[in-house]
Amino acid sequence: MQVSTEIEKIAKIDIFKNGKDNSTFVGRPFYIDYETAHLLIADAWKLRVGGIPQGTFLLAFYENEEKVEEALLLRALEPVNLPTHNDVIGSMIEYYKDNLKTAGKDSKLDEFTRYEFSFSGLKCRILGTFYRDTNKQIVFGADVENFFSAHNYRVFKPIGPVLEKISNLRDGDYVPGSKSDIPIGKIRYSSSTRYQEPGDPVPVYISPTDFLGKRTALFGMTRTGKSNTVKKIIEATVSISQKASSSILKPPDDPAKMLETIDDKGLPIYPVGQIIFDINGEYANPNMQDEGTAIYELFKKDVTRYSVIDKPNFKVMKVNFYKDVIEGFALIQSALSEEDSDYIRSFIAFDIAEPDPKNFSASTRYARQIAAYLCCLYKAGFKVPDKYKVKFSGNEELNELAGGRDPSKGLTLEEATIWFTAIWENRDDEFFTKYKSKNGKDWIDEDLKNILTILTGKKETGTSVSGFRKLQPINNQHTDKAEKPFSTEILEALRNGKIIIVDLSQGDPQIQKMYSERICRKIFSDSMARFIKNESNNFIQFYFEEAHNLFPKKEDKDLSQVYILIAKEGAKLNLGLIYATQEVSSISSNILKNTQNWFIAHLNNEDELKEVRKYYDFADFAAGLTRFSAGSDKGFVRMKTYSNPFVVPVQIDRFTAKKEG
């Protein structure tokens, strides 16, 4: 009831009536152009309104004509000299030289001089214009259509409900706190809060739909509140997902609505899936940051946790390389992707997809290639399931070379390894010469040559190489149990609106990259396939902590990497990307340029600030971003979301997994 009353109160706020209170008057402009306004302010006015911190929102109302309702929205930037600046400075210096008191009860200054000294100039950014349209509705435009002579304006500092309406500005007839809004924090202008503490804090809301299918960045040094903000976004997304109008992903009755994902109430039609790549383990495991709990604790019934190692109550991310051949080979490709040996590059380039069964010749060769590949796994120590055999087409002459073993009747992997090794060692046999002369191609084709090089550790030239030993480090990702591939399980859970936490805290960097990339590519490929088939995609949100460990570097020009694909093409596939890092300058520009939501906390060097200045109006906050008090500034961010027209300074609420009541 109280929330409803507050919403109604905000809904009735009229900026042109409620924004002009003489008690909040701060000054008058003496210069205006399309970008900036210079104000004349006085110490008494500043003191009366509780100070004007850098970044403060101000309203400059046009007051020359009663019929014109127009107000410029300003942001306080920095002091600016008044035309009388040099005269005032000169007078002050003279008083200092005479050692006269210039302030306080014992000031020796006369009233007129003290009055003159109390004025100063303030430079402000013009963020846009409030005006009343022909329908008598108050509208905001993010620029200045026209400005009048500076003397026609009076400037006020918005507070309370007026500030709440401005800080939560959206398109259309919007009321903060209504519909699907989630409170995320309070307005905070500065690190010092002596003047800001009195009175009721002004709440700031986010719309979870701003994050669905969008790119979101959280930048800041370690321990500045990035993870806390991510958890608040996850919490908000769960809230909106639970309001989805359909509980399962199914085709709509009307084919014309096939690709619609947001209903007329602004809510997702299907539940939202969320997957968190947890580098530090703070989302999957209890931690003292969140009063001893984590995201997993709060949404336990909807969360499945995966780990790279065996842990109680976690699913282990392992693949049966013999049963799920494509999944297993994809992991091998990821693990060996940075190898520069020519024979390794040739091996991982093998197209493991099964050919058209109607193509008998291709299918026959494919069966041999897969059998040889599985022998490589066996040789590398991958545990073989019980009673496991392979079948493929051999030849009587070749079978004799291999000790009479007939692969068409089925061979164990040990027997098949002996068979393929014998064939490779006798590759100069006249059978192969006759076969090529008759058929115009080699019996041992290029793909099989590459695989047999791995299996035997010998190239076609006879040169010894590491071969199957290169696969041994991947052995710990294999399970001999007949389970569904973890990437398939994860995808199915996300399609049903569940939360997946991938705990990578105990994996080495290579394993972290391999698993995160594999899972992302699986989801991206499935989403693209559904898009091409004109099938519905529910929203799936990716969360990356310490993103600089996984994302391509700024100088990396490979646009085929899955993270760049998600950033550039994810919007049409309903894939959202939320990433956190302290290294803005290390993130690929292809990702930064496609980012719509920004949360910027403390950054400690000019390189990072230089990158931030490029986007939206963050240049206005560059100086303040380098100032930080570890004891009081955690969670103090500058926020720009998709539906907000400008950056808002916010103190993010602390995440807690303790439910109220």
Image (spheres, grey):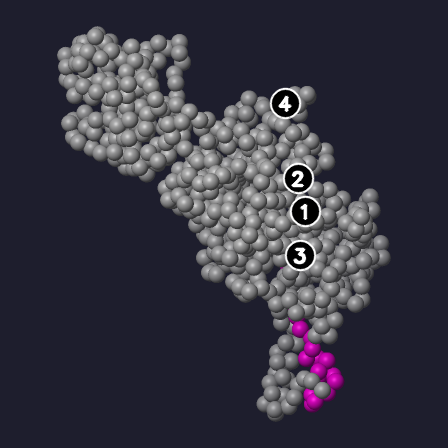
- Image side of residue 346 versus residue 465, left or right: right
| SS at badge 3 | strand
What's the magenta region? 106-128
- Image side of residue 394 versus residue 464, left or right: right
Q: Residue at x 28, y 23 (%)?
A: 375
Q: Residue at x 61, y 51 (%)?
A: 656
Q: Of the residues under marks 2 and 3, which one precedes in the sequence?
A: 3
Instruction: Identify which amino acid the numbered label 2 is placed on.
Output: Ile
Q: Is residue 260 above or below residue 153?
A: above
Q: Is residue 365 above or below residue 572?
A: above
Q: Residue furthest right?
A: 66
* Label 2 Cα neighbours within 10 Å, binned few <14 / some 14-19 / many ≥20: many
Q: What x and y, as percent, mark residue 522? A: 47, 30
Q: Which residue is mark 1?
A: 182
Q: Disc 3 versus disc 1: distance between alpha carbons?
A: 12 Å
Q: What x and y, as percent, mark residue 56? A: 66, 62
Q: Residue furthest bottom?
A: 98
Q: Which mark is residue 251?
A: 4
Q: Disc 1 versus disc 4: distance between alpha carbons?
A: 29 Å
Q: Of the residues under marks 1 and 4, which one precedes in the sequence?
A: 1
Q: Residue at x 21, y 8 (%)?
A: 396
The image quarter containing residue 308 is top left
Instruction: Identify which amino acid the numbered label 4 is placed on.
Output: Pro
Disc 3 and disc 1 in contact, CB within 8 angstroms: no
Instruction: Identify which amino acid the numbered label 1 is placed on.
Output: Ile
